[in-house]
Amino acid sequence: MKYDQIQEAVKYIRTKTSYKPQYGIILGTGLGNLTDAIDVYDEIPYKDIPHFPVSTVQSHKGKLVFGAIAGKPIVAMAGRFHYYEGYSMKQVTFPVRVLKFLGVQRLFISNAAGSTNPDFLPGDIVFVKDHINFQPENPLRGINDERLGPRFPDMLKTYDRTLIEQAKKIATEANIRFHEGVYFALQGPNLETPAEYNFIHRVGGDLVGMSTVPEVIVARHSGMTVFVASIVSNQCYPIESITETTIEEVIGVARVAEPKLRLIVKRLVMEVAV
Ligand code: HPA
């Protein structure tokens, strides 16, 4: 059934656009303006696509944007789905399956995240090199459909090293402050207690957030290469640095830092072959 649902969604999209994207981009909280980097050809609202969940979070737009960055064919998800909104992990990751069948081979994911590394400051860009998954309900749970990927996907090379190295080079040349870090995923929607931030820091998490990891798991299951860049929205370690965090602040910091990420993503798409 699930495979059929993916095909139905793809079939519908094919009636609306003949565009064949090879790169996919998922736009995170406050990062919707990344679409400014795209020469847009077609847009399809999520609500029109069979089996697509509909976005509920403020600051998310809810459409697929087809177009080109530096002449390369891309599709962007303007608006993503979070587990805390009430969707199942299968729903959260359904669009990633659809992107795969539209032809996407490289998936670029952005997000805004808290920092549990004292060197990572609000507004900094972090290239995610690994993750720790503390979210419930794995998106691959249940009978495995071999047409979508293997039963036990390996996670050793989850975050593509070539893309990270290229992104570091681009950031260095553009004088953009960056780090590499480990993303610790929780379900939210509440932010963490000081003791929880301390825990995340101690077990090796540099960033904490409520998204991304389900999409990464499904992208790797389906054989795409993955690149994740986070914008630090708030500092969560050490304890004295923690201030109360609101969604408005998270969005605000992400918006201000977004042009840096736009430059990096644009040049990455320009410079890497599929
Ligand atoms: N915790 C969890 N998710 C987040 C945070 C945070 O501090 N900041 C932005 N997303």
Image: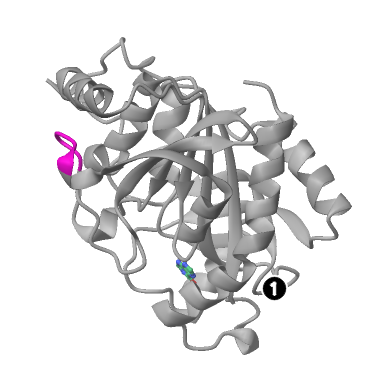
Q: Quick one: 256 or 214, which is closer to the camera?
A: 256
Secondary element under disc 1, as helix, strand or loop, is: loop
Task: Specify whether tag 1 is near ligand 1 (CB below 8 Å).
Answer: no
Q: Quick one: 83 or 265, which is closer to the camera?
A: 265
Question: Is residue 49 one of those drawn in magenta?
Answer: yes
Q: Position of residue 75 (x, y in %)?
A: 44, 35
Q: On the rendered structure, is 60 left or right of 49?
A: right
Query: Taking 178 as reference, is 73 above or below it?
Result: above
Q: Position of residue 180 (x, y in %)?
A: 72, 51
In magenta, the rendered stretch is: 48-52
Q: Quadrant of the C terminus?
A: top right
Question: Is residue 214 one of those drawn in magenta?
Answer: no
Q: Position of residue 198 (x, y in %)?
A: 57, 72
Query: Taking 138 as reference, is 240 above or below it?
Result: below
Disc 1 packing (10 Å; few <14; some 14–19; many ≥20):
many
Residue named by callout 1: 121
- Can the viewer see residue 202 in this picture? no
Q: Quick one: 169 or 210, which is closer to the camera?
A: 169
Q: Position of residue 110 (x, y in %)?
A: 53, 51
Q: Residue at x 79, y 52 (%)?
A: 171
Q: Amino acid at mark 1?
A: Leu
- Can the viewer see residue 179 in this picture? yes
